[in-house]
Image (cartoon, rainbow, N blue to C red):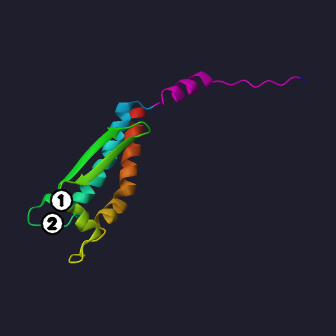
Amino acid sequence: MSSTIELEGYEEFEEYVKNMALDATIKRQAVRSGIKVIGEGLENDTPRGPTGELAEIKISVKENDLATEGTAKSKAFYDIFQEYGTSEQKAHVGYFERSVGENTEEAISKVAQTIFKKMG
């Protein structure tokens, strides 16, 4: 008694899996879309000062050996004092971390949407 299993459509599945590989351009676009959400959230949640420099957020996406990474940081040198506070000023302690935490899910969703849209 011999049993056989016949698979149909395996070639199409194999081709689909091969096409799932992400090239560097798609990775960068996906990370940029996610970090843009984080950056916009930071701009909205940042304390306003007389110059408005703290609210100017610089966004960048870079490739390194292990991953594609996105960064969002303030252009002002004194942003660290706002985030961690000083002996005189503690009003905005943790604003950066709270803002990133509030926007993380939306950013991840945006990254996933970008990847799935590009993959077809």
Q: Residue furthest left?
A: 50
Q: Are the residues flagged by discs 2 and 1 in contact, CB closer than 8 Å?
A: yes
The circle drawn on residue 98 is none
Q: Which residue bears the numbered disc 1?
A: 55
**Magenta stretch: residue 95 in it?**
no
Q: Residue at x 40, y 56 (%)?
A: 105
Quarter-of-image position of residue 62:
top left
Query: Between 82 and 8, which is closer to the camera in this rendering?
Result: 82
- Residue 66 horizontal side relative to residue 14, left or right: left
Query: Between 64 and 48, which is closer to the camera in this rendering?
Result: 64
Query: Going from the N terminus, do you reach mark 2 or mark 1 first?
Result: 2
Q: Which residues are magenta?
A: 2-21
Q: Amino acid at mark 1?
A: Ala
Give percent across and percent down for residue 68: 38, 40
Query: Between 94 and 43, which is closer to the camera in this rendering?
Result: 94
Q: Is residue 41 visible?
A: yes
Q: Which residue bears the numbered disc 2?
A: 48
Q: Of helix, strand and loop, which one carries label 1? A: helix
Please tell me how crowded label 2 is: few (under 14), some (14-19), or many (20+) other residues with Cα within 10 Å. few
Q: Is residue 120 visible?
A: no
**Magenta stretch: residue 7 in it?**
yes
Q: Residue furthest front?
A: 87
Give the Cα distance between marks 2 and 1: 7 Å
